[in-house]
Image (cartoon, rainbow, N blue to C red):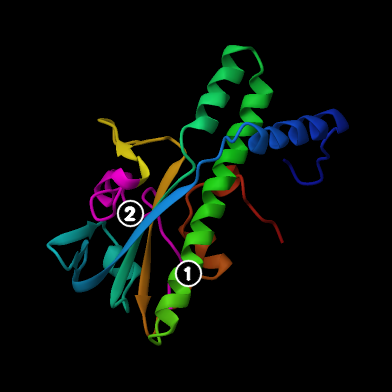
Amino acid sequence: MRKGAKVRPEIRLLIREVASSLKKSRLLKSAAAYEHYAARSMAGNQISLEGDKAIRGPFMAAMFPEAKELAIVLCTIGPRLEKQVTDYSKNGATLQGTILDCIGSAAVDELVSEVLRPIATEVSSRGYGTSSPINPGMPGFPLTERCNLLGPVNADGIEVRPTFSGMMVPRKSTSVVVGIGPQITRWTQAEVRARCTLEETCHYRVTN
């Protein structure tokens, strides 16, 4: 939506109808898995973890300079919503499919937030904090690392698998990494925007 734009009543009604179908058709089958790993060493392009695991990227060490541990989180809302989006498109209901696809993306983002809350609570009992989450595709964290994050967590347990092209199935799935430590700081909104490459095309852009 452009700044100042209004949603027409008929579109608003359609959004409500599509949203109501989520519960009735049980389109969301949310699942998540995560693991904590101690950070053994940091180099310019790699953080080495316990168990001979590593996360790679040009600026990984710079993103988590004070991390003692990393939490790797995998979230999915399952394949049902994606199938319904495809069915909408096949039947010529492109707008309904677009609306439902956007709802699915927002649901994955919300699921990540829900999973991060108990992680933050658990580490706070040890005097630790959590960083802002980062996900493959952000500057300094190559998209190719997305599938490499499936191994350190129980991806099979939540029925998420990689494809040959490096994507994840179900498509409405995501992986994030969070730094954990006693002096971890979270990014401000300005710092998040500075790291983002979407700029004017961002769906969640906020203008002051």
Location of mark 1 (residue): 118
- Residue 18 vs 131, above or below: the answer is above
Q: Amino acid at mark 1?
A: Pro
Q: Quadrant of residue 171?
A: top left
Mark 1 or mark 2: name the one nearer the start of the chain. 1
- Which residue lies at the image location 28% right of the left edge and 31% below the top edge? 165
Residue 12 is left or right of residue 78, and the answer is: right
Q: Amino acid at mark 2?
A: Phe
Instruction: Categorize mark 1 by other alpha carbons within 10 Å: few (<14), some (14-19), many (20+).
Output: few
- In the depicted view, which residue is nearer to us: 41 or 198? 41
Q: Nearer the viewer, residue 12 or 189?
A: 12
Whether the residues at callouts 1 and 2 have beta carbons within 8 Å, the answer is no
Q: In the image shown, does 156 or 130 lie closer to the viewer? A: 156
Q: Quadrant of the N terminus?
A: top right
Quarter of the image for residue 85 reads top right
Q: Which residue is mark 2?
A: 141
Residue at the extreme right of the image, as rendered: 9
Residue 35 placement: quadrant:
bottom left
Residue sitting at x 57%, y 35%: 27
Q: Which residues are magenta?
A: 129-157
Camera sees residue 73: no
Circle 2 crowding by C-alpha within 10 Å: few under 14, some 14–19, many from 20: many
Q: Is residue 90 left or right of residue 177?
A: right
Of badges 1 and 2, nearer the viewer stands 1
Q: Secondary structure at mark 1?
A: helix
**Residue located at (64% from left, 20% from top):** 94
